[in-house]
């Protein structure tokens, strides 16, 4: 318990240091000129919220023509600073109507569909059933084009008689990525490390090559966020006479970045 | 032989898939969307004066994204039957939207003695290494109540009360156990890049240390800081 208290006080100190750092800063707008993207408001006005969310109140309105610096972006919200050094959060839809020094609109991603050029990466978490046991998996995918993606996945299988770790590399082909409920087929291979659970006779751990084919569906809930369900049929190439088969069902969520 | 045939078939399928993806149907769609360029009737007229204007190239700095959070936490972990013990962990959060986030947690604690072990004197249910409990959890989170905390008339911190749910595994007593975890937490944004967290979690998993399977609820509290990047 004493170590917990010590570490807690360290955390509080670190927090205080962070606060002290944030306290300084006069006329940052001029000092940081050129460091951040500078845009002019082109809409009749730009609303600044106190936080990165629609429920945070609007505390300032910046009229058309005034310049703001874009400090950074978090989800769909931009932290901006006006020339009076007042900082606030503006929503993406509002920011779309701001102009760069060149007179062009601030280039932002297309909202009508997933933009594979801006968000080629997909990552997700799934859980389900693998050969009768539980399975947890995470994966990262990279879209080569709107139809084809490569995926790297790592799964932990937690069965009654054996646990295992599975690492696979595969291809996913989506014939209609523009559909809201987009089906896909997949294919890949990898390795599995099987750790049998200790019983009276404990068989040794073994590593086998695996290959799989499967199908699934992605449900685009928003342009950044999907639900995804997969079925995969695995073949374990064993050193014995017969190969082993495993079926896997899993579902989870994923996002693009 | 069978496996070789399968590998061959897999390769054929992989090539076929790759081939399908080359089919440029999406490009055809884009081409249809493009507006038809206006062509002048006279064609291109020779310009009298060649404009000597050097086009100014404006380089737009990239807007920094700050959707990830990473940081350590400390707290207490109450392993059912094994007492309350300090836990140390780390978290990585990705904010998908203003409402939703995904997070991965990894934590470690060393569990104590059961009442049975204390009362019986010498009897030990687990070895020292089996008392090390390590877990990971992959969660989905929802910012249920975003808000502001007013610490003085001129200063306010943004905050959020969030709920999480996820799956993971707990390595304990020589075995990995499938774990479902639900939790709630409070995030206080101290500035643009630093946040403090307070979390309460319940990790639910089955164990069979005494021969029969039973579901255990393991409550955890944690205090942590994260850095946004």
Image (cartoon, coloured by chain):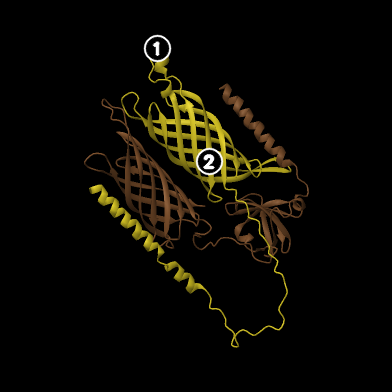
Chain colours: A brown, B yellow
Marks 2 and 1, the one that precedes in the sequence: 2
Residue at (57, 25) in percent of width and height = A4
Residue at (75, 52) in percent of width and height = A29
The percent position of residue B184, horizontal first and vertical second, equals 51, 39
Discs 2 and 1 lie in a common subunit: yes
For label 1, the residue is: B122
Q: Could you tell me which secondary element the residue under label 2 belongs to?
A: strand
Looking at the image, residue B184 sits to the left or right of residue B169; the answer is: right
Please tell me the numbered disc located at residue B23. none
Residue at (44, 49) in percent of width and height = A253
Q: Could you tell me which secondary element the residue under label 1 belongs to?
A: loop
The percent position of residue B162, horizontal first and vertical second, equals 54, 42
Question: Relative to the observer, which residue lies in front, B85 or B71?
Answer: B71
For label 2, the residue is: B92
Question: Relative to the observer, which residue lies in front, A7 or B30?
Answer: B30
The percent position of residue A132, horizontal first and vertical second, equals 29, 40
Q: Nearer the viewer, mark 2 or mark 1?
A: 2
The percent position of residue A255, horizontal first and vertical second, equals 48, 51
Q: In which quadrant is the N terminus of chain A drawn?
A: top right
Looking at the image, residue B42 sits to the left or right of residue B52; the answer is: left
Question: Relative to the observer, which residue lies in front, A103 or B55?
Answer: B55
């Amino acid at each position: 318990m004493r170590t917990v208290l010590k570490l807690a006080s360290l955390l509080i100190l670190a927090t205080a240091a962070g606060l002290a750092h944030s306290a300084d800063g006069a006329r940052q707008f001029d000092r940081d000129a050129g460091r951040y993207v500078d845009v002019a408001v082109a809409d009749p006005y730009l609303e600044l919220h106190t936080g990165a969310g629609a429920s945070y109140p609007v505390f300032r309105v910046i009229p058309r023509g005034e310049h703001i610096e874009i400090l950074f972006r978090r989800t769909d919200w931009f932290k901006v600073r006006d020339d009076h050094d007042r900082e606030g959060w503006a929503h993406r839809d509002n920011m779309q109507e701001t102009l760069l020094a060149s007179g062009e609109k601030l280039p932002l991603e297309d909202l009508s569909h997933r933009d594979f050029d801006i968000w080629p990466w997909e990552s997700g978490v799934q859980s389900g059933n693998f050969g009768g046991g539980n399975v947890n998996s995470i994966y990262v995918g990279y879209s080569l084009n709107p139809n084809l993606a490569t995926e790297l996945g790592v799964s932990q299988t937690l069965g009654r008689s054996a646990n295992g770790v599975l690492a696979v590399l595969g291809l996913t082909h989506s014939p209609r990525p523009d559909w809201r409920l987009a089906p896909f087929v997949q294919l890949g291979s990898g390795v599995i490390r099987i750790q049998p659970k200790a019983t009276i006779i404990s068989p040794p751990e073994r590593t086998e090559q695996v290959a799989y084919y499967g199908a699934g569906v992605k449900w685009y809930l928003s342009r950044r966020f999907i639900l995804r369900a997969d079925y995969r049929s695995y073949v374990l190439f064993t050193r014995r006479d017969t190969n082993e088969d495993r079926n896997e069902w899993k579902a989870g969520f994923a996002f693009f970045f | 032989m069978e496996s070789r045939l399968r590998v061959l078939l897999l390769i054929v399928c992989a090539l076929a898939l790759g081939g399908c993806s080359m089919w440029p149907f999406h490009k055809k769609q884009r081409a249809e969307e493009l507006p038809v360029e206006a062509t002048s009737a006279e064609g291109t007229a020779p310009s009298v004066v060649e404009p000597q204007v050097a086009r100014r190239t404006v380089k737009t700095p990239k807007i920094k994204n700050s959707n990830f959070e990473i940081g350590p936490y400390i707290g207490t972990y109450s392993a059912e039957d094994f007492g309350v013990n300090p836990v140390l962990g780390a978290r990585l959060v990705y904010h998908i939207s203003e409402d939703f986030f995904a997070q991965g947690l990894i934590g470690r604690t060393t569990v104590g003695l059961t009442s049975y072990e204390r009362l019986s004197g010498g009897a030990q249910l687990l070895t020292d290494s089996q008392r090390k409990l390590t877990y990971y959890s992959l969660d989905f989170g929802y910012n249920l109540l975003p808000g502001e905390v007013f610490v003085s008339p001129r200063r306010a911190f943004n905050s959020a009360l969030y709920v999480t749910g996820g799956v993971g595994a707990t390595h304990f007593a020589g075995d990995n156990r499938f774990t479902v975890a639900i939790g709630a937490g409070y995030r206080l944004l101290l500035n643009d890049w630093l946040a403090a967290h307070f979390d309460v979690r319940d990790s639910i998993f089955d164990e069979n240390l005494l021969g029969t399977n039973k579901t255990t609820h393991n409550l955890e509290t944690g205090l942590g800081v994260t850095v946004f990047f």
